[in-house]
Amino acid sequence: MSKIKPIATYSEATLTGKRRYELYPDKILVEGNVSGSYDYERGFALSKLSTEYITLRIRPLVAWVALITCIVTGFASFLLVYEFAVSSRVLPGVLGIYSGSALIVAIATMQKVEYARFCSEDYRTVLLSVARSGPDKKQFDTFVQALVNQIVQARDAAQQVVRACEKSG
């Protein structure tokens, strides 16, 4: 038995992990991993997704955590040296290095990532998010449009089946 080839594929990589999407005539499969924690595979029936999607540009949470860490450790280092007159320079130095490292991480992750989020057909739940990030980010618009087109076709096919059942029953 031969495996059906996907209509389109897309791979993304974000700070939280990697995902690979395979678009089929009636479903989309998502395989991914979350930064060393776990692997997963999930499928969605396209007829359950809305063709309208939400476009978001999100700054990763790690950028804010790193920025706050930079400020707090830098301030603590400053206080230890100038307010508390700590005789040892080791602890303030370590905090200063940690603060500088956190600043580098904050700067490196400050860029926002664009997402296309697809809701359920009743718009109650976001079921699928695709990020413009990683090796295929130049194909993001093409993949999202292919997904929308395939959702329309899957819904039409599902409606034809319902009509055929109504006529026969």
Image (spheres, helix red, strand yellow):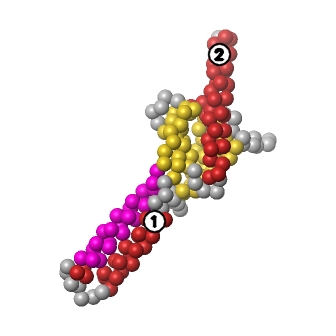
Mark on residue 163?
A: 2
Give the vertical position of 90 relative to 141 (above or below): below
Relative horizontal placement of residue 154, taking residue 61 as reference (left or right): right
Q: Secondary structure at mark 1?
A: helix
The prevailing secondary structure element of the residues shown in magenta is: helix
> Which residue type does callout 2 highlight?
Arg
Residue 93 image point, x, y percent:
34, 82
**Which-is-in-front pick, marks 2 and 1?**
1
Is residue 62 a member of the stretch shown in magenta? yes
Give the vertical position of 42 relative to 164 (above or below): below
| Residue at the (21%, 84%) spot, across then down | 85
Q: Quadrant of residue 167?
A: top right
- The answer to whether marks 2 and 1 mark residues whose Cβ atoms lie closer than 8 Å is no
> Which residue type does callout 1 highlight?
Ile
| Residue at the (75%, 43%) spot, across then down | 5
Residue 45 image point, x, y percent:
60, 34
User: As rendered, which of 151 and 158 lies closer to the eye?
Assistant: 151
Query: Can residue 17 be seen at all in this image of the molecule?
Result: yes
Relative horizontal placement of residue 137, taking residue 73 as reference (left or right): right
Q: CA distance from mark 2 to mark 1?
A: 56 Å
| Residue at the (62%, 41%) spot, across then down | 144
Residue 153 image point, x, y percent:
67, 29
Is residue 60 a member of the stretch shown in magenta? yes
Q: Which residues are magenta?
A: 58-79
Residue 60 image point, x, y percent:
46, 56
Relative horizontal placement of residue 133, taking residue 103 as reference (left or right): right
| Residue at the (31%, 82%) spot, across then down | 91
Q: Secondary structure at mark 2?
A: helix
Give the residue pinned by disc 1.
107
Q: Quadrant of residue 103?
A: bottom left
